[in-house]
């Protein structure tokens, strides 16, 4: 359940932003999750409400924007879109695709009041 | 429970001593090196009397909502998106944050990496499913490094949900080992390892082996400050495991295929397992070993030596 640790990371980021920027209520949290990142959006949603309880983002809406995965094919040199780490290159069919995009996960913005 | 960080009655234990609830700040006052905004320490006390400090980084960039000030000095709350202010109608606005969810862990991992780098210590993070033979392999590795004419000092951090069985097995070799029990946790994080470094204080030029919690999923996401993740796959598991648990094989630099002495008794397709792992990670290095027969051990020790010398040469 490392989604729980990630939810705690989100909580810390949100609480820190609240203290440094002087807001006390967060209505929505917008995340960017890469398609190739090691996190399952549904599992993260599942913990989010519990972890945000008693904080400035209690009851906040969680919006997750999934960023498409991409990689560079070491066989044909093309940068291609991939949906999973084990996908072959859609151009040449080779499996030597090194993931380069859609691997991150970050808090992009907050809707506050 | 702490309202600031959510820390509470934790179950994390180092050598059976609880990590004090809310006690987040390492003694050497490491602030996360998030890179965005200067760290600012903020101490606070909990209702139960315990205290700790958090390092706070400014997210930066976003303007703070201020009510408009009129010429007569009164404050105007009506210039927000809703155009009017009433307690029920909030002035919603968006604040850009742009921070990685793992910023804090990565900050601590960066500190661990600096600390290790300054001492020329090679740190390896060993990850696998439970039962792949990590601890037996570590015991065998330590014995081999200690049997050399020029002994290579090895220190071990053991991560398990419960018990200190593994640390005891390591200590039986004479190597210092520290057990971290993660309680309900599924992985080691960089702060736990930072704590372990303080306690163990491994010597310069040594090898630090971190045996992560047996789990092929979560430890992939958490950088501990190691030079490399080493994933152990034993031949008693399925050869399709790299495809079923791709994140770990993507994060690793080396795959040790363990228990190869059992290959004659199994239908495990070794070439297929390696091919699957390289589909995930084309640059993955592979060494076949057996902790019980000693097969492949020299190649594994040679790999450690190469990394060890690289860590020593990179020492400032």
Image: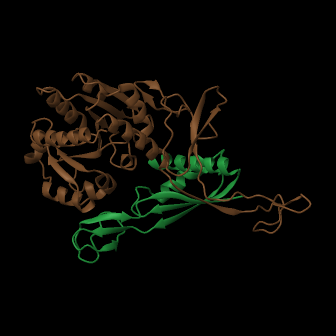
Chain colours: A green, B brown
Q: Is residue B104 left or right of residue B54?
A: left
Q: Is residue B19 left or right of residue B217?
A: right
User: Percent from the top left, x then y, of residue B168?
Assistant: 29, 24
User: Percent from the top left, x then y, of residue B293?
Assistant: 9, 36
Query: In which quadrant of the rendered image does the N terminus of chain B lie?
Result: top right
Note whether B231 is above or below B153 in the view shown.
below
Q: Residue furthest front?
A: B316
The residue shown at (63%, 40%) is B4
- Total numbered labels placed on residues in the image: 0
* Camera sees residue B277: yes
The residue shown at (15%, 38%) is B301
Q: Residue furthest bottom?
A: A91
Q: Residue B244's quadrant in the figure?
A: bottom left
Q: Residue B316's quadrant in the figure?
A: top left
User: Percent from the top left, x then y, of residue B262?
Assistant: 11, 43
Q: Residue furthest left?
A: B264
Q: Is residue B59 left or right of residue B100?
A: right
Q: Residue B155's quadrant in the figure?
A: top left
Note whether A50 is above or below B158 in the view shown.
below
* Camera sees residue B128: no
User: Percent from the top left, x then y, of residue B55?
Assistant: 56, 40
Q: Is residue A58 left or right of residue B75?
A: left
The residue shown at (39%, 38%) is B112
The residue shown at (28%, 50%) is B252
């Amino acid at each position: 359940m490392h989604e729980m640790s990630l939810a705690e990371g989100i909580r810390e980021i949100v609480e820190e932003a609240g203290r440094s920027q002087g807001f006390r209520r967060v209505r929505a949290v917008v995340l960017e999750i890469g398609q190739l990142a090691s996190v399952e959006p549904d599992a993260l949603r599942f913990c989010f409400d519990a972890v945000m309880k008693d904080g400035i983002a209690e009851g906040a809406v969680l919006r997750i924007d999934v960023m498409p995965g991409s990689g560079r094919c070491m066989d044909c040199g093309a940068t291609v879109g991939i949906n999973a780490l084990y996908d072959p290159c859609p151009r040449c069919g080779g499996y030597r695709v090194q993931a380069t995009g859609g691997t991150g996960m970050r808090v992009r913005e907050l809707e506050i009041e | 429970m702490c309202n600031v960080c959510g820390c509470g009655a934790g179950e994390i234990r180092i050598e059976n001593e609880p990590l004090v609830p809310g006690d987040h700040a390492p003694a050497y006052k490491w602030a996360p090196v998030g890179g965005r905004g200067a760290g600012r320490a903020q101490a606070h006390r909990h209702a139960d009397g315990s205290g700790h400090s958090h390092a706070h980084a400014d997210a930066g960039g976003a303007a703070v909502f201020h009510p408009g000030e009129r010429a007569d000095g009164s404050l105007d709350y009506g210039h927000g998106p809703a155009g009017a202010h009433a307690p029920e109608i909030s002035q919603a606005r968006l604040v850009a944050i742009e921070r990685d969810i793992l910023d804090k862990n990565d900050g601590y991992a960066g500190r661990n990496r600096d600390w290790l780098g300054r001492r020329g210590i090679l740190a390896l993070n060993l990850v696998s499913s439970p039962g792949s033979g990590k601890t037996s392999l570590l015991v065998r590795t330590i014995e081999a490094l200690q049997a050399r004419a020029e002994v290579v000092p090895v220190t071990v951090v053991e991560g398990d949900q419960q018990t200190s069985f593994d640390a005891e097995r390591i200590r039986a070799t004479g190597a210092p080992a520290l057990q971290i029990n993660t309680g309900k946790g599924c992985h080691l994080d960089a702060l736990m390892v930072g704590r372990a470094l303080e306690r163990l204080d491994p010597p310069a030029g040594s090898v630090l082996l971190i045996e992560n919690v047996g789990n092929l999923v979560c430890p992939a996401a958490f950088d501990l400050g190691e030079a490399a993740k080493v994933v152990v796959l034993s031949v008693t598991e399925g050869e399709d495991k790299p495809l079923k648990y791709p994140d770990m094989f993507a994060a690793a630099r080396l795959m040790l295929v363990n228990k190869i002495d059992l290959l004659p008794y199994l239908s495990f397709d070794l070439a297929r397992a390696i091919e699957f792992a390289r589909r995930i990670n084309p640059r993955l290095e592979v060494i076949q070993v057996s902790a019980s027969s000693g097969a492949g051990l020299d190649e594994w020790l040679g790999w450690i030596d190469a990394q060890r010398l690289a860590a020593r040469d990179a020492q400032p």
